[in-house]
Image: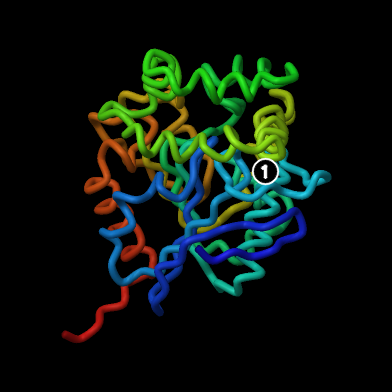
Amino acid sequence: MPRIELSSGPIDYQDTGGDGPVLVFGHGMPMNETQWRKVVPMLGGYRCVLPTLPLGGHRQPMHPDADLSQRGVARLLGEFIERLGLGEVTLVLNDWGGGQFLVLDGQDQHIARMVLVACEAFDNFPPGPAKAMAQVCRIPGAVWLLTRLMRLPLVRHSRGGYGGMSLRGIPDEIMDDWFAPATRSRAIRRDFVKFATGAPDRKTLLAWSERLREFDRPVLVVWATEDRLMPREHGPRLAALYPQGRLIEIADSSTLIPEDQPERLAHVLTDFLIHTGAEPVRHAS
């Protein structure tokens, strides 16, 4: 897997290559690029770039002084796009919504459009049950204990936790991969804690959300009708926040729409890209 050294540390990434329009995918905590494994193969004609961000599922630790707050990781994502020379990209987020905060630091000059798929928004950082987990993460050794508990099916598949993020169920081998880095590395557990506890207070989050109105390029908001983590009213509210926002709701899905409804998501994503000037590259047979 390719790797690039950024100011905060190394970032692994996948790159499908090609000369089509570039899509950059973000993921949740402590997930990685496999969150999009069902969707990317359906996006022929596009170059898909999938960084493994330092949200706890990353395979190489960041520098000890790295800023892994919500805004810090957003800046790191902006640096990643800049350093790879990707040009104008479509930013696609699911679960983690902090990539929107690129707007705050003027790092959105390379973002031609955004697709926000059932992600954190407004004051929902972190969402639902994760708020309690963030508090627990402040206790020394808590993340180590969490990684052990996640081996237990009762905990792993709990509808109040990760089990509630997908109506279909997340395969065990995928979850094993997500939690493996924090299981084996104290430095990655340190990074996990930084990110999990790195959201500001509600007042600050709502102030940041108002700043998102400055993003005047196309935004597609894709929301799940049976989501346990992202409030349903946040979908239309988020779409209305952006001057060029539009909303599509997808039924029979929870937060991880790429897991529950990959075909439907690939279809609405492709349709949005084509209608906003990002036609896939068609190669003659």
Identify the residue under disc 1. 211
Q: What x and y, as percent, mark residue 263? A: 22, 48
Residue under the point 31% across and 52% down: 39
Q: Taking the image as drawn, is residue 123 in sight?
A: yes
Q: Residue at x 48, y 32 (%)?
A: 237
The percent coordinates of residue 31 (x first, y second) are 49, 40
Q: Does residue 140 appear left or right of residue 164 in this picture?
A: right
Q: Where's residue 231, x and y in %?
A: 45, 23
Describe residue 179's horizontal placement relative to residue 163 as left or right. Answer: right
Q: Position of residue 207 (x, y in %)?
A: 71, 33
> Who's the residue at 31% across and 39% down the image?
259
Q: Is residue 239 visible?
A: no
In the displayed structure image, the side of residue 203 where residue 163 appears, left or right:
left
Image side of residue 118 versus residue 146, left or right: left
267 over 233 or under it: above or below: below
In the image, residue 159 sits, relative to residue 104, either above or below, namely above
**Quarter of the image where the C terminus is located:** bottom left
Residue sitting at the far right: 65
- Snapshot quadrant of residue 18: bottom left
